[in-house]
């Protein structure tokens, strides 16, 4: 066999190995960062006050879980849809550093690899599959959203208003998550809660009109 034939043979063997290696890497990458579904209610059930817990549907609760963060959804009084998102890496975050930026263009938020949770529902959450929040982030709202009231407390911060599209962006300007209400803007209570061991985002929507007083169903005491 000539040197030329040997080179061709090596090339023909190498190309499939390289292709398989490439797709194998991305398959492992996506698997590592993807959420796993869990049908349980207990992990974040404590975030509700004792009196509110009796009105939370335990059978319809469930979570999307991975190593960096977990998102659990609950239904309260058959009217309120509540999402609790725990992110351990942000346990030391300074809530006052987080900016709420309004009137932004968020129609073209894209991720290289991503997972969309609750696709086809009234609220879709798309999360970047890769290294997640580390230090701080900003909350971006599109022109179809509006903050009616900013909420401030020692250990939680947020706003009440209406949301159409909302994105979470790190300090480098990279989008890490995107919350979209495809049909229309929804009344929303958005809270960031900090305890000693973790950081939580709480998002409340409802079938009925409500206001920021819904915060009273949550156990947001400093731990």
Image: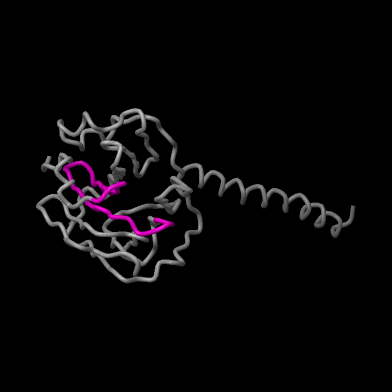
Image quarter for residue 66? top left
* Residue 199 on the magenta segment: yes
Judge by depth and name the residue closer to the eye, 47 or 80: 80
- Is residue 150 something one can see in this rendering? yes
Q: What's the coloring here?
A: one colour
Image position, residue 179 (x, y; %): 38, 55
Instruction: Give the farthest residue toward the right.
Output: 1
Q: Is residue 89 above or below residue 149?
A: above
Which residue is nearer to you in this view: 126 or 122?
122
- Locate residue 190 relative to residue 128 in the image: left or right: left
**For this rendering, which residue is in front, 160 or 71?**
160
Taking depth in this image into account, of 157 and 223 the one nearest to the observer is: 157
Residue ID at (44%, 64%): 109
Q: Quadrant of the C terminus?
A: top left
Place of residue 65 in the rendered image (x, y in percent of width and height, measured from the top left): 39, 39
Up the image or down, 114 lies above or below 86; here it is below
Residue appearing at x 17%, y 40% in the figure:
217
Residue shown at 27%/56% (left/top)? Answer: 135
Say above or below: 107 vs 214: below
Quarter of image, res 166: bottom left
Question: Which residue is rendered at x = 23% and y = 32% of the image?
Answer: 55
State left or right for residue 23 relative to residue 51: right
Picture quadrant where residue 72 is located: top left
Side (left or right) of 183 relative to 223: right
Residue 184 among those drawn in magenta = yes
The percent position of residue 186, horizontal first and vertical second, equals: 32, 55
Task: Look at the image and give the residue range highlighted in magenta.
Answer: 181-209
How far across and how far down the image is residue 86, in percent?
29, 43
Residue 167 visible at all: no
């Amino acid at each position: 066999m000539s040197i030329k034939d040997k080179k061709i043979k090596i090339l023909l063997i190498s190309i499939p190995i390289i292709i398989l290696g490439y797709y194998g890497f991305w398959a492992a990458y996506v698997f590592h960062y993807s959420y796993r579904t869990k049908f349980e209610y207990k992990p974040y059930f404590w975030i509700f006050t004792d009196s509110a817990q009796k009105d939370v549907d335990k059978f319809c609760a469930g979570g999307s879980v991975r190593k960096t963060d977990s998102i659990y959804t609950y239904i309260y009084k058959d009217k309120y849809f509540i999402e609790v998102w725990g992110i351990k890496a942000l346990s030391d975050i300074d809530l006052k550093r987080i900016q709420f930026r309004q009137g932004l263009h968020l129609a073209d938020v894209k991720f290289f690899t991503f997972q969309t949770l609750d696709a086809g529902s009234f609220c879709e959450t798309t999360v970047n599959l890769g290294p997640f929040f580390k230090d701080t982030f900003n909350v971006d709202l599109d022109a179809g959203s509006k903050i009616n009231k900013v909420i401030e407390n020692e250990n939680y911060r947020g706003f009440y208003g209406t949301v159409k599209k909302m994105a979470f962006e790190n300090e480098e300007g990279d989008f890490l998550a995107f919350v979209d209400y495809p049909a229309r803007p929804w009344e929303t209570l958005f809270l960031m809660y900090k305890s000693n061991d973790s950081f939580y985002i709480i998002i409340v929507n409802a079938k009925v009109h409500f206001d920021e007083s819904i915060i009273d169903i949550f156990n947001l005491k400093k731990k």
